[in-house]
Image (cartoon, rainbow, N blue to C red):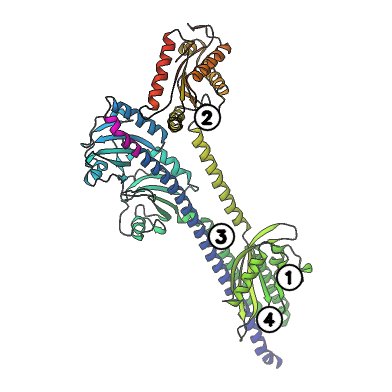
């Protein structure tokens, strides 16, 4: 009996030490879990900020190029206006020219020339010619502040067709420099919707295109309730962006327009080479809840495990100690319970994927827990416990850097927070996150380093996958852009490609003083062919004839295009009239030799073609439209002369 009081202080000290160890371990684990969760939360936010900023820059660069193209188109139209004004059919020529520009620029819906009174003189949309739009803001602003070098960007407005439009405007100065009207291009929201949707990589993601004054132009996905509203309110993302004076910003918080908690990247679109009275603005945002949904799930698991540690470890230790006080024979049971608790703690740590290590700098002795051995693929029996056992598993490309960072950390604040790769004993490469803290002696020298490793390989692979998918998206975008200039049935160039090509070749031949030839080709009595053999056979006939043209016009700079219906056009740079007539006759004979039956043709019993030929050396007094008109007239003459012939 007398031995019990003597043993009590020693037992209490041991029990107290056990409690201190358990509490310290739980505090350390809680601190590590909290720190790791905080770091992961910040890393997710950082990655998302970079993604949103990158996608905003993609929109900025694309729209910047389109605005530059529109500015050049409006300038060209304005420069040609004096010539049109001097012609009897000048406005008809202007209308054709505006139509060609609109076809070549998918992002433009309407091009128009307005006089000083606001009346439309010419447009690619005939229904608005003669209309007066003096009261529209896009006309009043340049009227009140005319500047021939300025590109005016109107606020969004709703048209009579219930569509939201932004107009891009250039002032037309008169001979005396006074205001003489405007040239205007309206942005096509359907084309811009394709661009805005192309950068969305998550369902909760929203992309908005706004006017510099704060009015919403359009969103993807579309939100009719937001179109036309003003974002210019105190404390709004828009107002904060404008007040910052910066080209791009990223904000996190509640959006004034919807009340949603979102992360948003804003970027002003105002290319350096353009004088714009107002910029456009792109805003790309994601829902904060969706961004951190996966992180919250992981946090619940880890915090649940931490709660399990507390609920299991502390009561376990309490009951173990109480059992020890009751009787010596219950000590074994208490020890077993403690071991069981420790095993559960180890299982929980293993599930969390965290490896703990310690390095004695004086001896280079390295201590690993069981998870570190699993992570590196080194069994405890094969582990020498020296720093070299670790360094020989570090990826050779990362070893110099991580060694330097470790030494620099010891020379500074004793904290290492970095990433590196290892090569496991089975050859697998893994990406690890390391966080370590050094303990210093009284003289300031580091003595020991305690740290943790955890595997971030899947996160790295996810980032690489996102990069690859973005590259594939860009390739698909380029493919779609190329397909916009190909006729879907025949595979040759379409009318849009023809219009762009003849303009370009006309300029090139005018610069070089070379002739430019044009063949206008019509399949004889093609309507009768469709009526007799059916439209499917008619489509096959068109494809066969187009393939023949493409094979016979084998110079790299010749262009075959489907002009419309059964009519084709061949643009032949550096080719005079004699050469064009010879090539036309060759094509006519080749089609005739196909021997495609055409019982209802009045020209022959097989499919034939009529060709109109025109060629000239471009000069300042003529235009591509003159060449097209000459080839059309020749084709008309060939058809009047009985068809299945060439005229020039």
Q: CA distance from mark 3 to mark 1?
A: 34 Å
Work out whether mark 2 precedes mark 1 in sequence or the reverse, and give the earlier one: 1
Q: CA distance from mark 3 to mark 2?
A: 60 Å
For the C terminus, the image quarter is top left
Residue at 61% over, 54% down: 461
Give the SS element for disc 4: helix
Residue depicted at 69% across the width and 89% down the height: 7
Answer with left or right where residue 458 lies relative to residue 90.
Answer: right
Q: Nearer the viewer, mark 4 or mark 1?
A: 1
Q: Please name the residue shown 71% across and 63% down the image.
A: 376
Residue 314 seen in render: no
Can you name the residue that lies furthest to the left here?
A: 117
* Front residue (pair 575, 113): 575
| Residue 369 magenta-highlighted | no
- In the picture of the structure, the residue carrying the numbered disc 4 is 324
The N terminus lies in quadrant: bottom right
The numbered dot on residue 557 is: 2
Q: Earlier in the sequence, mark 4 or mark 1?
A: 4
Give the distance between the C-alpha atoms of the residues marked 2 and 1, in whole angstroms.
66 Å
* Residue 78 lies within the magenta run: yes
Nearer to the camera, 327 or 294: 294
Sooner in the amino-acid sequence: mark 3 or mark 4: 3
Q: Is residue 56 above or below residue 190?
A: below
Considering every residue shown, the one lying at the far bottom of the view is 2
Q: Which residues are magenta?
A: 75-86
Q: Of the residues under marks 3 and 2, which one precedes in the sequence? A: 3
Q: Dot 1, how many residues are within 10 Å of its Cα: few (below 14), some (14-19), or many (20+)?
A: few
Q: Report which residue position mark 1 lands on.
A: 388
Could you tell which of marks 3 and 1 lies nearer the N-terminus? Answer: 3
Q: Which quarter of the picture shows residue 638? A: top left
Callout 3: 10 Å neighbours few (<14), some, many (20+)? some
Dot 2: within a 10 Å radius of its alpha carbon, few (fewer than 14), some, or many (20 or more) residues?
few
């Amino acid at each position: 009996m007398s031995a019990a009081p003597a043993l009590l202080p020693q037992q209490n000290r041991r029990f107290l030490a056990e409690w201190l160890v358990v509490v310290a371990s739980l505090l350390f684990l809680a601190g590590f879990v909290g720190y790791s969760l905080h770091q992961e939360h910040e890393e997710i936010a950082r990655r998302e900020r970079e993604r949103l900023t990158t996608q905003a820059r993609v929109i900025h660069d694309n729209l910047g190029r389109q605005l530059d193209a529109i500015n050049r188109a409006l300038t060209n139209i304005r420069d040609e206006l004096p010539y049109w004004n001097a012609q009897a059919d000048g406005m008809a020529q202007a209308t054709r020219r505006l139509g060609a520009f609109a076809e070549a620029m998918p992002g433009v819906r309407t091009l128009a020339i307005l006089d000083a009174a606001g009346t439309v003189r010419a447009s690619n949309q005939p229904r608005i010619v003669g209309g007066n739009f003096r009261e529209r803001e896009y006309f009043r602003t340049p009227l009140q502040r005319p500047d021939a070098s300025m590109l005016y960007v109107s606020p969004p407005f709703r048209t009579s067709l219930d569509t939201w439009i932004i107009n891009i405007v250039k002032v037309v100065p008169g001979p005396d420099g006074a205001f003489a009207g405007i040239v205007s291009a309206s942005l096509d929201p359907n084309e811009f919707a394709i661009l805005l949707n192309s950068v969305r990589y998550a369902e909760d993601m929203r992309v908005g295109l706004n006017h510099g004054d704060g009015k919403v132009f359009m969103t993807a996905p579309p939100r009719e309730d937001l179109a036309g509203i003003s974002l210019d309110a105190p404390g709004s993302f828009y107002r904060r962006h404008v007040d910052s004076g910066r080209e791009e910003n990223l904000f996190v918080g509640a959006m004034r327009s919807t009340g949603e908690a979102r992360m948003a990247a804003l970027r002003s679109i105002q290319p350096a080479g353009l004088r714009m009275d107002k910029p456009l603005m792109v805003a790309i945002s994601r829902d904060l809840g969706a961004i951190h949904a996966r992180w919250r799930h992981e946090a619940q698991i880890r915090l649940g495990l931490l709660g399990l540690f507390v609920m299991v470890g502390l009561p376990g230790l309490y009951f173990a100690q109480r059992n020890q006080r009751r009787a010596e024979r219950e000590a074994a049971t208490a020890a077993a319970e403690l071991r069981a608790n420790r095993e559960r703690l180890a299982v929980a740590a293993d599930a969390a994927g965290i490896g703990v290590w310690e390095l004695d700098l004086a001896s280079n002795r390295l201590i690993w827990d069981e998870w570190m051995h699993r992570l590196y693929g080194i069994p405890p029996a094969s582990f020498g416990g020296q720093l070299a056992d670790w360094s020989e598993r570090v990826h050779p490309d990362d070893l110099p850097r991580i060694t330097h960072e470790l030494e620099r950390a010891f020379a500074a604040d004793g904290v290492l927070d970095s990433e590196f790769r290892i090569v496991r004993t089975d050859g697998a490469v893994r990406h690890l996150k390391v966080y370590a803290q050094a303990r210093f002696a009284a003289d300031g020298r580091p003595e020991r380093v305690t740290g943790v490793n955890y595997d971030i390989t899947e996160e790295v692979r996810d980032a690489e996958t996102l990069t690859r998918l973005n590259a594939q998206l860009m390739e698909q975008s380029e493919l779609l852009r190329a397909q916009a200039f190909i006729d879907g049935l025949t595979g040759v160039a379409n009318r849009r490609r023809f219009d762009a090509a003849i303009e370009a070749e006309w300029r090139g031949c005018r610069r070089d003083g070379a002739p430019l030839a044009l063949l206008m080709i019509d399949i004889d009595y093609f309507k009768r062919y469709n009526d007799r053999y059916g439209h499917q056979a008619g489509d096959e006939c068109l494809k066969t004839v187009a393939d023949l043209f493409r094979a016979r016009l084998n110079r790299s700079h010749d262009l075959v295009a489907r002009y419309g219906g059964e009519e084709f056009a061949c643009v032949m740079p550096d080719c005079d009239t004699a050469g064009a007539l010879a090539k036309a006759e060759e094509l006519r004979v080749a089609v005739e030799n196909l021997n495609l039956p055409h019982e209802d043709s009045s020209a022959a019993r097989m499919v034939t073609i009529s060709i109109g030929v025109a060629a000239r050396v471009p000069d300042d007094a003529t235009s591509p439209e003159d060449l097209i008109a000459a080839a059309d007239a020749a084709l008309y003459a060939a058809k009047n002369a009985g068809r299945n012939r060439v005229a020039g």
